[in-house]
Image (spheres, rainbow, N blue to C red):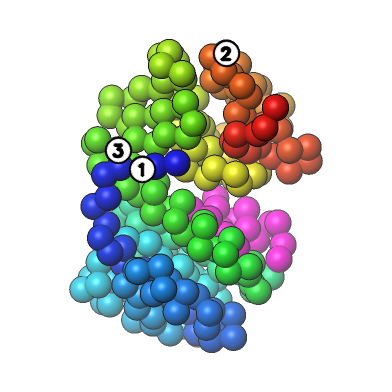
Amino acid sequence: MKVEPDRFDPPRFLLVGADPRGTRRLEPAVVAEGWKALRVGTGAAATPVAATFQPHVAVIELVLPDLDGLQVMHLLRRDRPRLPVLVLAAVDRAEVRTHALVEGGDDCVSTPFHLPELLSRLRALLRRKRMSTDPAASIVIGDLALHEHPHQVRRGGHPVDLTVSEFELLRHLMTNPGRVLSRDYLRSRLWPPDQTVTVRMIHQHVARLRKKIDAHGPALIHTVRGLGYILEQRKP
């Protein structure tokens, strides 16, 4: 997969966290990726630091010594409304992750985390930010291409006519290739929080997109029973 062009050279990563046991591996791993990294231990320190550092992506612990992590996220987004944020939760509960996503978090991972998976999620958030700020941005997976401006999708050279919501759904799938996106994740991203969205509605939404995308080639969008949906190329 490629995303082009790259205007984040190098990307700047902000970590807001006070628990070194949970995140001590993350900062050096990000530096090893070639990113610039900065860590602060309190929510109050995050806003002034971000004003100077200008992060491209942030990881914020849900529990901080002074402020709630989601509160810090909202403070950072006053000046950077499109800042991608991954929330770290100390408990592995679905309702906690769902709340973080509904409040505006781009992703939520519980600690202790699997470092390669977390890095993969951060790369996906950065790809999404590139697309939202770069009028020439494209994502290409196999023979499927999504062009941000104008909103165009092609499969095997054939144009695919999508509604706005179908385009948004496809973008989420393509910026997270090989990752299962849960129904709660899609619900929080594609519908307003006050709208009632059933599992059936989400499934029908995906089914319509799948029918259009897979009409011109092998199946790319798959259902993972009980978990959600994934976009990946599978061998026949």
Counting from the top left corner in percent of width and height, residue 181 is at: 62, 43
Give the answer, above or below, for where 81 lies relative to 93.
Answer: above
Mark 1 / mark 2, whichever is N-terminal: 1
Residue located farthest toward the left when viewing the structure as drawn: 52
Q: Is residue 121 left or right of residue 227?
A: left
Residue 3: assigned label: 1
Determine whether label 1 and label 2 are within 8 Å by CB: no
Residue that carries the numbered disc 2 in the rendered image: 215
Q: Quadrant of residue 210?
A: top right
Determine whether label 1 and label 3 are within 8 Å by CB: yes
The type of residue carrying mark 3 is: Ala
Residue at 52%, 45% in the rendered image: 176
Give the answer, above or below, for where 117 lies relative to 169.
Answer: below
Q: Quadrant of residue 150?
A: top left
Determine whether label 3 and label 2 are within 8 Å by CB: no
Give the answer, above or below, for where 99 lies relative to 202.
Answer: below
Q: Residues within 10 Å of mark 1 (few under 14, many from 20)?
A: some
Does 132 lie within the magenta span?
no
Of 68 and 129, nearer the camera is 129
Residue 137: assigned label: 3
Residue at 31%, 72% in the rendered image: 36
Give the answer, above or below, for where 229 lies relative to 21.
Answer: above
The reply to whether residue 2 is in sight is yes
Mark 1 / mark 3, whichever is N-terminal: 1
- SS state under label 3: loop
Mark 3 / mark 2, whichever is N-terminal: 3
Q: Residues within 10 Å of mark 3 (few under 14, many from 20)?
A: many
Residue at 71%, 33% in the rendered image: 223
Of 159 and 148, nearer the camera is 159
Counting from the top left corner in percent of width and height, residue 25 is at: 53, 79
Task: Please give the range of residues in magenta.
Answer: 92-109
